[in-house]
């Protein structure tokens, strides 16, 4: 009986042991499989992934991408430290690690690496500190962004060149307008004035009758030519802007606004001209033309206020209307706003000169637009500056 009990106990024990061994084997196989899966993911990653011992700064483990990127092979790994391939001073590396440890044990940013063959690459690194086997280890995931940064730099350079080109183009256009305006003034207008004088002389000599009526018609036509050509000259390029200055040109523009729209344009102007360079005058004048055109188009029937002042070496031009207003957010630099390019052009040109455009408007609450530029341009702005009026 006792023997039977012992045998059954042994059988139960063996069954339990076999099941335990079987389960442990399955568990180990699962662990091995999951580890090899995990390793495959790390190895095949397009990013360099490596572990650094925080005490010695040695590389504990690194994937293939790390080796391809840095040029260090498996044989180099045992002696390789962070200082060997991070292209920053040793102190900088230590400071950065101290900063990571004291600031949330994480870091995301850019670092320069030096490859085994001496090439410098810019890396975007994502670092976090983990504890493995009781030791603090830095886990780094790094991506080569050298080409991307270079492309970004080139894009910005192209954008700057494009802006400079647009600015030069606008100034060239203004120069051409001025040339045509001066030409019209010096030739067509002078000739028409001379014709008018001759017709006046003829009038004195002709007897009263049909001829006088024909002559009066001819003189009225010449008067028209003179008036229309003068308006054209002013619209092309107001002589006031060059002969007097921005203050005079704004006063003239405000009058024109009233004549053509019937609406009042109040101006608050300095008592004297501001002594601005040609480029600043032209840019502010053209911007004001656009802002007044906008007021006429988007805030019809509203009075407009224009204020020009110079404070602390900067010129400020503010245009205010009490129309419907708009949301300036809809004018983001790359927005798909359906309007024209008027405000965009103003912003680009002011930006080129170290100036800016500010909106203080709310939908339904009127529009205040302020333009600000330095009263004198830096030679580095790419836009030459010559003081005039
Ligand atoms: N004074 C204003 N009042 C109301 N909305 C304005 C005013 N000025 C500009 N806007 C808004 O800003 C947009 C962009 O202006 P702009 O770049 O000059 O283009 P455009 O005048 O050709 O539409 C306009 O379409 C309009 O919606
Ligand atoms: Mg416009």
Image (cartoon, rainbow, N blue to C red):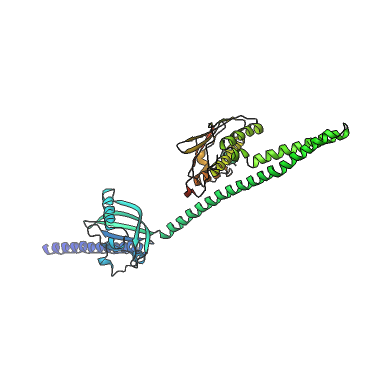
Q: Is residue 364 visible?
A: no
Q: Quadrant of ligand 2?
A: top right
Decide: is 75 above or below 363: below
Q: Does 89 appear above or below 362?
A: below
Q: Judge from the rendering whether residue 255 lies leftward or rightward of residue 98; answer left or right.
A: right
Which of the pair 370/51 is nearer the observer? 370
Quadrant where the N terminus sits is bottom left
Q: Quadrant of residue 272?
A: top right
Q: Give the percent coordinates (x, y) of residue 107.
A: 32, 52
User: Horizontal and vertical percent for residue 128?
Assistant: 30, 53
Q: Which residue occupies 27% across, 59% down?
A: 52
List x then y, in percent, for residue 203: 82, 34
Q: Is residue 381 visible?
A: yes
Q: Nearer the viewer, residue 97 or 191?
A: 191
- Quadrant containing the C terminus is top right
Say left or right for 235 vs 372: right
The picture quadrant where one finds residue 97 is bottom left
Considering depth in this image, is 136 or 165 the residue closer to the camera?
165
User: Residue 43's spot in the image, x, y percent?
Assistant: 35, 64
Tell me: residue 360, above or below residue 351: above
Q: Is residue 219 above or below residue 63?
A: above
Dividing the picture into quadrants, the one containing residue 139 is bottom left
| Residue in view at x 11 percent, y 62 percent | 2
């Amino acid at each position: 009986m006792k023997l039977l009990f012992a045998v059954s106990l042994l059988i139960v024990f063996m069954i339990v042991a076999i099941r335990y061994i079987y389960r442990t084997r399955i568990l180990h196989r699962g662990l091995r499989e999951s580890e090899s899966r995990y390793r495959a993911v790390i190895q095949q990653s397009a990013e360099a992934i490596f572990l650094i011992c925080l005490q010695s700064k040695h590389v504990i483990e690194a994937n293939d991408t790390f080796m391809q990127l840095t040029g260090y092979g498996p044989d180099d790994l045992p002696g390789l430290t962070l200082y060997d391939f991070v292209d920053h001073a040793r102190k900088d590396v230590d400071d950065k690690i101290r900063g990571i440890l004291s600031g949330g044990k994480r870091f995301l940013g850019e670092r320069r690496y030096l490859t085994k063959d001496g090439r410098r690459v810019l890396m975007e690194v994502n670092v976090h500190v983990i504890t493995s086997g009781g030791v603090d280890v830095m886990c780094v995931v790094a991506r080569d962004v050298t080409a991307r940064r270079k492309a970004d730099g080139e894009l910005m350079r192209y954008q700057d060149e494009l802006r400079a080109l647009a600015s030069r183009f606008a100034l060239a256009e203004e120069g051409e307008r001025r040339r045509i305006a001066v030409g019209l003034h010096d030739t067509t207008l002078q000739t028409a004035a001379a014709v008018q004088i001759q017709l006046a002389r003829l009038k004195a000599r002709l007897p009263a009758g049909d001829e006088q009526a024909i002559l009066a018609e001819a003189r009225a036509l010449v008067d028209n030519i003179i008036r229309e050509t003068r308006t054209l000259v002013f619209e092309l390029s107001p002589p006031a802007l060059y002969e007097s200055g921005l203050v005079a040109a704004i006063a003239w523009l405000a009058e024109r606004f009233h004549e053509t729209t019937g609406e009042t344009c109040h101006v608050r102007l300095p008592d004297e001209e501001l002594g601005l360079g040609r480029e600043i005058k032209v840019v502010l004048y053209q911007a004001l033309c656009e802002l007044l055109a906008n007021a006429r188009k988007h805030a019809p029937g509203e009075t407009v206020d224009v204020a020009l002042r110079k404070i602390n070496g900067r010129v400020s031009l503010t245009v205010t209307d009490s129309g419907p207003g708009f949301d300036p957010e809809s004018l983001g630099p790359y927005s798909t706003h359906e309007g024209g390019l008027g405000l965009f052009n103003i912003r680009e040109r002011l930006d080129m000169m170290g100036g800016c455009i500010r909106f203080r408007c709310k939908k339904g609450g009127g529009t205040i637009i302020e333009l600000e530029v330095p009263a004198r341009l830096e030679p580095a702005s790419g836009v030459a500056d010559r003081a005039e009026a």
